Image: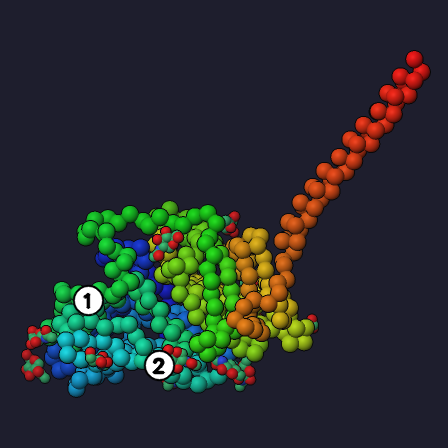
């Protein structure tokens, strides 16, 4: 049995973004008789939440090299790329054309929850299929669709597919990807200044206190059911290729480059954040007996430039950010959430409400202990100053009384 949770090793630096997100792309090719009709070179990362015997679990894994395109079809006006992998999993892209344009009009993922190596402790053995008709993949006929930027597509609240380093063409005329490119809008804003064939400078890493992101999950399209406002900093210890040793690297999550999704349940809520090659998955659990909620699980996967393999970590027995149902949890102080020995998260100016959100806004806040202690300091200092003033005043009054008494004896 093959595990699809395999690691993606550092690959060659083909392009600017390819370099930043040192990855290893998968090549998929579909033939119609002797001629190639679809060719795709891309990275795809799947982030899936499922029910396990322990509660809700989340996994992140990449489309493996070994994916087969045997069930693809190219006849007719609609072409179909089916990448099958592992124990009955498959990603399907359905293309259609329209005048001088072609594009992906339907995308689906089938995954087999019986596959224990990918979905440990799943309490279901179902083969699940999820799909969407909204995809931003579209290009001019006879051109290659190019999108180096990371672009997540949510198939439903539990499943997100994130593509990056994409080069693909359907309705091909020759066996090679066309040199004419249709560049996605995300790339156009990112790579305008980059002259080709020069060594790219590493992007300046955001440092200092992270900016606050505002992540709202809705149950239908308008009613918020999970609210989170927080600055996030990741701290990952991994083996660095260039320095040939373990390093701890700290990175801020940049809200304006972060996409998010999630789900709200009666006792379990999730929030998934994706920035470029970094995926973070939070699970909040409600204890209906104690009427308290807490952050119960965090999983991460990341492919930072200096990593030799994808870093992934998960801990599903956490007890962080505990608050009462019907209130929000607030912590303005910096807080460190240790997830694993090699992964921790620092939170800044956090406010959170994963359950019972009403009127699309936070309920009254419960402050964390650190904030309460921080508020004590000015009170203590104030009290000390008041005490000092009092002592000086008493000393002065006593002094004045003595002096007056002295004059009287002369
Ligand atoms: C494929 O190519 C071979 C050799 O060029 C040729 O004999 C055969 O007829 C071709 N098959 C199709 C379906 O075009
Ligand atoms: C988990 O189980 C609950 C209850 O059976 C169900 O409502 C929910 O949709 C399931 N979630 C997933 C991700 O399958
Ligand atoms: C699977 O897990 C969910 C949530 O943990 C639970 O509600 C459901 O009853 C479980 N299903 C089975 C068949 O055990
Ligand atoms: C799902 O996985 C199980 C166990 O890995 C395997 O026996 C079964 O054939 C798979 N189902 C499909 C449809 O491939
Ligand atoms: C085809 O083009 C027409 C006109 O531009 C547009 O209304 C329609 O939605 C397109 N269909 C597809 C499948 O892209
Ligand atoms: C694409 O290329 C083929 C062959 O080179 C040509 O026949 C066709 O008209 C082109 N299509 C478009 C929309 O440019
Ligand atoms: C949410 O919005 C999308 C697109 O606007 C629409 O297709 C969908 O039906 C809406 N869902 C609900 C539950 O309103
Ligand atoms: C990052 O983690 C390392 C190892 O756990 C620790 O020594 C370091 O202080 C952490 N840095 C920050 C900024 O959290
Ligand atoms: C994101 O925000 C930072 C700081 O506000 C800004 O410098 C950067 O240009 C923004 N990036 C994008 C893609 O909007
Ligand atoms: C819920 O809270 C109660 C009371 O604090 C505790 O006894 C129980 O173990 C908790 N249940 C879970 C599943 O954590
Ligand atoms: C599930 O629970 C068992 C025991 O309660 C624990 O040992 C195991 O690590 C848990 N697994 C996950 C994935 O949370
Ligand atoms: C998961 O988190 C718990 C609570 O913080 C901790 O005790 C445990 O050691 C962690 N598990 C691992 C494998 O680091």
> Residue 320 location in percent, x, y?
59, 63
Image quarter (top left, top right, bottom left or bottom right) of the C terminus:
top right
Place residue 338 in its image quadrant. Answer: bottom right
Query: Toward the viewer: 258 or 14?
Result: 258
Disc 2 under 8 Å from ligand 7? The reply is no
N-terminal label among 2 and 1:
2
Residue 247 lies left or right of residue 69; in this view the side is right
Evaluate whether residue 347 shows in this view. yes
Residue at 59% over, 67% down: 363
> Residue 331 location in percent, x, y?
58, 57
> Residue 301 location in percent, x, y?
42, 63
Residue at 22% over, 64% down: 183
Residue at 20% over, 84% down: 78
Query: Toward the viewer: 166 or 90?
Result: 166
Q: How is the image coloured?
A: rainbow
- Tell me whether circle 2 and circle 1 mark residues in contact (CB < 8 Å): no
> Residue 228 location in percent, x, y?
51, 64
Residue at 26% over, 49% down: 200
* Kind of element beneath mark 1: strand
Report, in whole angstroms, how far the alpha carbon at label 2 lies from the one at label 1: 25 Å
Dot 2, crowdedness within 10 Å: few (<14), some or many (≥20)?
some
Residue that label 2 marks: 131
Q: Which mark is residue 182?
A: 1
Q: Which mark is residue 4?
A: none
* Kind of element beneath mark 2: strand
Query: Toward the viewer: 286 or 193?
Result: 193
């Amino acid at each position: 049995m093959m595990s699809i949770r395999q690691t993606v090793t550092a690959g060659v630096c083909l392009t600017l973004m390819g370099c930043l997100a040192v990855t290893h792309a998968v090549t998929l090719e579909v033939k119609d008789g002797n001629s190639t009709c679809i060719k795709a070179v891309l990275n795809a990362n799947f982030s899936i939440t499922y029910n396990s015997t322990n509660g809700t679990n989340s996994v992140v894994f990449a489309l493996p090299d070994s994916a087969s395109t045997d069930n693809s079809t190219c006849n007719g006006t609609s072409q179909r790329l089916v990448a099958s992998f592992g124990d009955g999993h498959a990603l399907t892209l359905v293309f259609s054309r329209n005048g001088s344009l072609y594009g992906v009009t339907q995308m689906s993922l089938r995954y087999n929850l019986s596959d224990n190596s990918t979905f440990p402790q799943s309490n279901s053995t179902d083969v699940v299929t999820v799909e969407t008709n909204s995809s931003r993949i579209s290009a001019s006929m006879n051109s290659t669709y190019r999108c180096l930027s990371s672009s997540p597509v949510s198939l439903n609240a539990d499943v997100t597919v994130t593509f990056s380093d994409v080069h693909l063409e359907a309705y091909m005329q020759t066996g090679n990807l066309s040199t004419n490119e249709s560049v996605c809008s995300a790339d156009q804003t990112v790579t305008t200044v980059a002259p080709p064939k020069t060594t790219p400078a590493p992007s300046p890493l955001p440092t200092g206190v992270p900016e606050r992101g505002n992540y709202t999950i809705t149950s239908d399209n308008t009613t918020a059911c999970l609210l989170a406002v927080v600055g996030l900093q990741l701290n990952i210890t991994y083996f660095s290729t260039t320095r040939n040793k373990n390093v701890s690297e700290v990175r801020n999550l940049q809200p304006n480059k972060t996409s998010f999704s999630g789900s709200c349940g009666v006792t379990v809520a999730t929030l998934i954040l994706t920035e470029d090659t970094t995926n973070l998955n939070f699970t909040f659990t409600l204890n209906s007996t104690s009427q308290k909620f807490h952050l119960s699980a965090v999983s991460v996967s990341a492919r930072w430039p200096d990593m030799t393999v994808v870093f992934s970590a998960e801990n599903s027995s956490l007890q962080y950010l505990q608050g009462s149902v019907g209130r929000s949890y607030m912590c303005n102080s910096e807080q460190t959430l240790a997830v694993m020995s090699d992964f921790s998260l620092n939170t800044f100016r956090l406010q959170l409400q994963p359950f019972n959100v009403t009127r699309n806004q936070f309920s009254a806040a419960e402050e964390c202990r650190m904030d309460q202690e921080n508020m004590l300091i000015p009170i203590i200092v104030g009290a000390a100053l008041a005490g000092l003033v009092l002592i000086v005043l008493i000393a002065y009054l006593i002094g004045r009384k003595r002096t007056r008494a002295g004059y009287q004896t002369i």
